[in-house]
Image (spheres, helix red, strand yellow):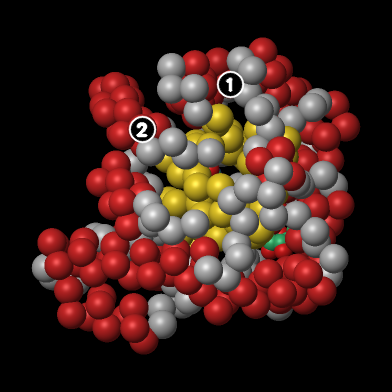
Amino acid sequence: MKVSELYKKGGRTLSFEIFPPKKDEELKNIDDTLEVLCELKPDFISVTFGAGGSCNCNKTIELARKIKERYRVEPVVHLTCLHYDKKEIDEFAEVLRSSGIENILALRGDEREDIPKKRDFTYASDLTAYLKERYDFCILGACYPERHPESENMVDEIKHLKLKVNAGTEVLLSQLFFDNQIFYDLRERCRIADIDVPVIPGIMPVVKAAQIKRMVSMCNASFPLRFQKIVDRYEDNKEALFDAGMAYALSQIIDLLVSDTDGIHLYTMNNPRIARRICEGIRNIV
Ligand code: FAD
């Protein structure tokens, strides 16, 4: 099923992001995680993609197939384009099509020193337009409440987002954020720019000290004072940080749900304990 259909029915989605583990033996353990995640009946699960290698041995596709065939949950396959040419993208698309996978999160990806950049695609919107012309996938795209690190300002960010949607993006999944007002501002800017597709907030419960350092260096996400106080107080107390990080994420989610968002996309970090705690916390919230 195409995930865009879920929003046409006026429904609100709960979805998870997982990543394919690097080691083969961890790939076996992912079954335990999937068991729990799928029991929670998400509307879809998105699987991240690491550029490099061909589609024949691609772990993202292997995991997405498993989610669809064994667990009967709709997968969304992330696909980056900076390091692939049209022929290689066609190979990915054909494998996805023949596996019955209908949803792609079309991404540009980041430059990497170890893999040469190719010239067929410059932006995610190029990949989106290419896939839309040739195939029948539902295309999702990324958006950035605090703007992409390469964007000079929010005006350019929204202009480029509009191009992405005009190219055929049907649903936007957001980068993580810790201040809901920043997401509401993005949603408002989208409305003003006539970007008329569901914009789904991405929430990552911060439950480990190492994660916090990564957030600061990688994703531009600003920490509100209320969140910073949790980090300062519990950085060195594993269990307390887990509880406080989960409570913070839950309060973000409840505020988003009562503010008419079209769904919640949860960055699970392959940790079923996180997904379960969130689902329990919003069990009776409609
Ligand atoms: P784009 O939409 O192409 O934007 C990149 C930059 O170019 C932005 O600054 C944008 O404003 C600018 N731009 C866009 N179009 C134009 C234009 N026409 N002219 C000038 N400038 C333009 N990375 C992975 O490697 N694997 C993953 O699985 C993955 N999953 C992700 C999931 C989500 C929900 C998000 C938010 C990000 C994910 N990423 C992933 C990271 C992503 O690949 C990087 O953030 C990357 O730097 C940008 O990708 P994009 O698709 O947003 O690029």
User: Horizontally, is 13 left or right of 139 in the view?
Assistant: left
- Residue 102 placement, left or right of 281: right
Q: On the image, which quarter does residue 28 sit in? A: top left
The amino acid on which the numbered mark 2 sits, given as a three-letter code, is Glu
Q: Kindly give the residue lying farthest to the bottom in the view shown.
A: 225
Whether tag 2 and tag 1 are in contact, CB under 8 A, the answer is no
Task: Please tell me whether mark 1 sits on a helix, a strand or a loop.
Answer: helix
In the picture, the disc for residue 212 is none
Q: Where's residue 283, x and y in %? A: 37, 52
The residue under the point 52% across, 64% down is 257
Residue 164 coordinates in the image, percent (x, y): 79, 53
Identify which residue, 8 or 168, lies in the foreground: 8
At x 44%, y 36%, the residue is 41
Front residue of 153 and 198? 198
Ligand 1 sits in which quadrant? bottom right
* Residue 50 shows in this picture: no
Q: Amino acid at mark 1?
A: Cys
Sequence order check, earlier mark of 2 and 1: 2
- The residue wearing badge 2 is 39
Q: Which mark is residue 55?
A: 1
Q: In the rendered image of this protein, does residue 45 appear above or below residue 207?
A: above
Q: Are there few (<14), some (14-19), or many (20+) residues within 10 Å of tag 1?
A: some
Residue 34 vs 171, above or below: the answer is above
Relative horizontal placement of residue 220, taking residue 1 as reference (left or right): left
Residue at the image position 49 percent from the left and 22 percent from the top: 72
Disc 2, ligand 1: is the CB inside 8 Å? no
Picture coordinates of residue 248, whole percent (x, y): 33, 70
Q: CA distance from mark 2 to mark 1?
A: 29 Å
Of residue 250 and residue 33, the one placed in the foreground of this image is 250
